[in-house]
């Protein structure tokens, strides 16, 4: 389906190359603009506590790892999401409409798993820098420390926890995003950037608040280092969940909910709004 063409589902689907470039721009825009909020959220969720993890100081610590992983991670997500949405819309069988919430959930879930191959190593390095696990060091040094201490597998610590968070998140966010965008858009016409941004902000805020406990579990697993005690190395999801509740009660599962909801609410507007603007800008460039 060509850029700007309305398909059977009533959706405008960008080409693969367009989604690739637009995804890279939108991913970098969000990470650079809202990185300090993400840092504060991570420190609030760390086992050592907000102030010991760094408080309000050095909120851009770990930005180097994000700069490396942001563009490819977002590009993988959007190209996979748009490709799967188009494929499922054309090949969906059964009693559900092609442009259904199920199509959006499946497309977003597959896209998230694909993007996590790049995103998880970036998050591991970033979160450890944000909380000064290795002290104040560069992203390259933090990367080397992870590999030296835990091997390549250490870069994927928390992969299952991330998937546990991302799939429910996307299953909430993207059907809501597509629904809100559809209701804001005049039938037969393409949504404007502000409609995409508004839909992304509302959907992202709702999904962020509801999945905060899963984000807390993911953060704790990623911050864990190999050590001498069983508690330090046992990073199974259920064990981590029990540890969080034992240490801080049920309220600890919602640590960082305000900055997380704020960050993803604003970030959703920028992420999806920028993607929409960039796709349209690329369309205007002569072939």
Image (cartoon, rainbow, N blue to C red):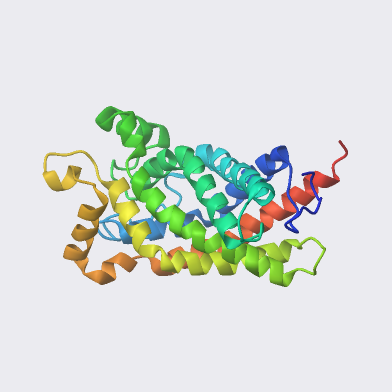
Taking 41 as reference, is 156 above or below it? Answer: above
From the viewer's perspective, tell me whether residue 275 is left or right of residue 1: left
From the viewer's perspective, tell me whether residue 148 is left or right of residue 59: left
Percent x, y for residue 105? 54, 56
Percent x, y for residue 111? 54, 46
From the viewer's perspective, tell me whether residue 4 is left or right of residue 264: right
From the viewer's perspective, tell me whether residue 201 is left or right of residue 61: right
What residue is shown at x 82% (from left), y 64% (from top)? 188
Q: Is residue 278 visible?
A: yes
Percent x, y for residue 14? 73, 46
What residue is shown at x 29% (from left), y 54% (from top)? 53
Question: In this view, which residue lies farthest toward the left?
Answer: 229
Question: In this view, which residue lies farthest toward the front?
Answer: 94
Residue toward you, 187 or 56: 187
What residue is shown at x 80% (from left), y 68% (from top)? 187
Percent x, y for residue 219? 33, 52
Residue toward you, 161 or 23: 161
- The quarter of the picture where the C terminus appears is top right
What residue is shown at x 65% (from left), y 47% (from top)? 91
- The quarter of the picture where the N terminus appears is top right
> Quadrant of residue 103 in the image?
bottom right
> Quadrant of residue 189 in the image?
bottom right
Residue toward you, 155 or 143: 155
Q: Is residue 198 visible?
A: no
Taking 234 as reference, is 59 above or below it? Answer: below
- Total count of labels: 0
């Amino acid at each position: 389906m060509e850029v700007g063409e309305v398909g059977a589902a009533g959706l405008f689907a960008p080409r693969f190359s367009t989604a690739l470039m637009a995804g890279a721009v939108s991913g970098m825009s969000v990470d650079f603009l809202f990185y300090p909020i993400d840092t504060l959220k991570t420190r609030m969720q760390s086992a050592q506590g907000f102030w010991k993890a760094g408080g309000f100081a050095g909120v851009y610590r770990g930005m180097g790892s994000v700069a490396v992983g942001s563009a490819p991670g977002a590009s993988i997500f959007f190209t996979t999401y748009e490709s799967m949405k188009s494929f499922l819309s054309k090949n969906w069988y059964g009693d559900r409409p092609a442009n259904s919430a199920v199509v959006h959930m499946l497309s977003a879930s597959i896209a998230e798993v694909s993007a996590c191959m790049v995103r998880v190593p970036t998050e591991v390095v970033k979160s450890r820098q944000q909380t000064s696990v290795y002290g104040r060091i560069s992203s390259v040094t933090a990367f080397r420390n992870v590999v030296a201490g835990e091997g390549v597998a250490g870069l994927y610590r928390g992969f299952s926890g991330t998937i546990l968070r991302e799939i429910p998140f996307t299953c909430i966010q993207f059907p809501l995003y597509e629904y809100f965008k559809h209701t804001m858009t005049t039938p037969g016409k393409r949504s404007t950037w502000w409609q995409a941004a508004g839909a992304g902000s509302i959907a992202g805020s709702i999904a962020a608040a509801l999945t905060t406990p899963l984000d807390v579990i993911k953060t704790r697993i990623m911050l864990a280092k190999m050590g001498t005690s069983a508690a330090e190395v046992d990073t199974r999801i259920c064990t981590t969940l029990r540890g969080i509740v034992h240490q801080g009660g049920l309220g600890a599962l919602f640590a960082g909910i305000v900055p997380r909801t704020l960050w993803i609410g604003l970030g959703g507007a920028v992420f999806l709004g920028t993607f929409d603007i960039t796709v349209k800008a690329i369309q205007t460039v002569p072939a």
